[in-house]
Image: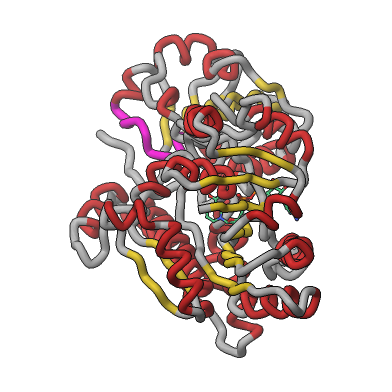
Amino acid sequence: MKIAIVGSGYVGLVTGCCLADFGHNVVCVDKDEAKIAALARGSVPIFEPGLEDLAKANVAAGRLTFTTGLADAVRAAEVVFIAVGTPSRRGDGHADLTFIYDAAREIAAALDGFTVVATKSTVPVGTGDEVARIIAELNPGARFAVVSNPEFLREGAAIEDFKRPDRIVIGVEDDRARAVMTEVYRPLFLNQAPVQFTNRRAAELIKYAANAFLAMKITFINEVADLCEAVGADVQDVARGMGSDRRIGSKFLHAGPGFGGSCFPKDTRALVQIGADFGSPMRLVETTVAINDKRKAAMADRVAAACGGDLSGKTVAVLGLTFKPNTDDMREAPSLDLIRGLKNLGVRIAAYDPQGMEAAARILTGIRFAESAYDAASDAEAVVLVTEWNAFRSLDLARLKSTMAGSVFVDLRNVYRSHEMERHGFRYTSIGRPVEG
Ligand code: NAD
């Protein structure tokens, strides 16, 4: 099939590369000329494990190309995926649909022959209706159907998630479009990936409901971790005991500094707004957002408390900047709140991240970007482990300790064990775990 992907970011590129790998003929479109120029040179502008190799192989096989020319790509396509960003609108947290509607207008002008327009971006309920209205208004003769096909991939494991999804959700109101979408995903039916056909509004809501539920689960265990600290229980024991109940499941029960990233914060805020728009409040989600914002903002004080109070003029090493390991994505990363808070306390920051420093340098000023974890720790009063990259799971603790001025280690991901850290001379604190005797 001939497929155009509008928006070549994390989702668009992964979708494009994987669909090309299924044997489709794919053109990835982006309006960012630098991004397209890099892709045309064979360089993938984001860090996602395996993506560059997958792109190269499919370009070499003649199935994958990159362009800024949306019109030609759309004209030739049987299916056009919209994979542009839907960030939070400044001020009210509603999903900003500017990019979606701009893309819809550009697509409308270029449609030729029956075309399925499938929205991969996460969009509020009713957006598909509006995309269809825009296209019909701008191009009354166009033959098209708008489908909702939300994406559930996780950054850092995106290719595996796309190729072996737990489910594919397709919101479709039109039989012809349903047949086209079946064809797009046929290679996955062979892998027996479950496909759920539903209507467009349900598909749009499934994505938000799923993300909000996961965000709520994380927030729940974070509150349980606080309670564990108060009562002297270990949150990892509690999470294990809860998670082995199959009705609950063990995933997303890891206590930490609060959720961040490119999806959960903006999608929870957007779902609150969707509820308000339709007069059906999402109170659990509202509370989740509030608890999480407060938690992220409280991490700097937690570090200061671990250091015994005044940190002014001292150095803190921050290990891990991205919102999770195996990505270079810095969007709404917990490290940002932590660093902001520490700077307000007069702290000097030295930070290291295996992949995120280029993106971080575009957001963070006035901090030192180190060459390694050990370099970051040099002369530091405290080390804070923020993102659980593999590189930070097996630190040479003796070496780390020897470079520091102080001895505090704040483990916001519960990677280490307190007796091991104490053996190396650290004053160790983690999340929701009592100090071992
Ligand atoms: P992104 O910011 O990485 O990429 C969006 C791209 O779209 C950018 O490169 C931008 O230049 C391009 N773009 C915007 N308007 C365009 C236009 N009119 N024509 C051509 N290109 C245009 O965003 P992302 O992380 O890939 O997310 C895209 C959508 O997918 C969002 O709605 C997001 O919520 C959703 N989503 C993201 C993830 C994730 O893990 N990142 C997972 C599931 C769903």
- Res. 239 in view: no
- Point out the image quarter for the C terminus: top left
Question: In the figure, 318 relative to 17: above or below?
Answer: above
Taking the spot 54% from the left edge, 34% from the top edge, the residue there is 62
Question: In the figure, 203 relative to 421: above or below?
Answer: below
Coordinates of residue 406 in the picture (x, y in percent): 54, 20
Specify the farthest residue to the front. Answer: 113
Q: Nearer the viewer, residue 172 or 402?
A: 172
Question: In the figure, 27 relative to 117: above or below?
Answer: above
- Res. 342 in view: yes
Question: Please, which colouring scheme is shown?
Answer: secondary structure
Taking the spot 62% from the left edge, 38% from the top edge, the residue there is 65
Coordinates of residue 359 in the picture (x, y in percent): 68, 33
Magenta stretch?
Answer: 411-419
Taking the spot 51% from the left edge, 41% from the top edge, the residue there is 17
Give the side of residue 80 with respect to residue 215, left or right.
Answer: right
Residue 416 colored magenta? yes
Residue 27 colored magenta? no
Give the side of residue 281 with respect to residue 310, left or right.
Answer: left
Q: Nearer the viewer, residue 429 or 276?
A: 276
Q: Nearer the viewer, residue 411 or 8?
A: 8
**Dominant secondary-structure state across the stretch colored magenta:** loop
Coordinates of residue 55 in the picture (x, y in percent): 53, 33
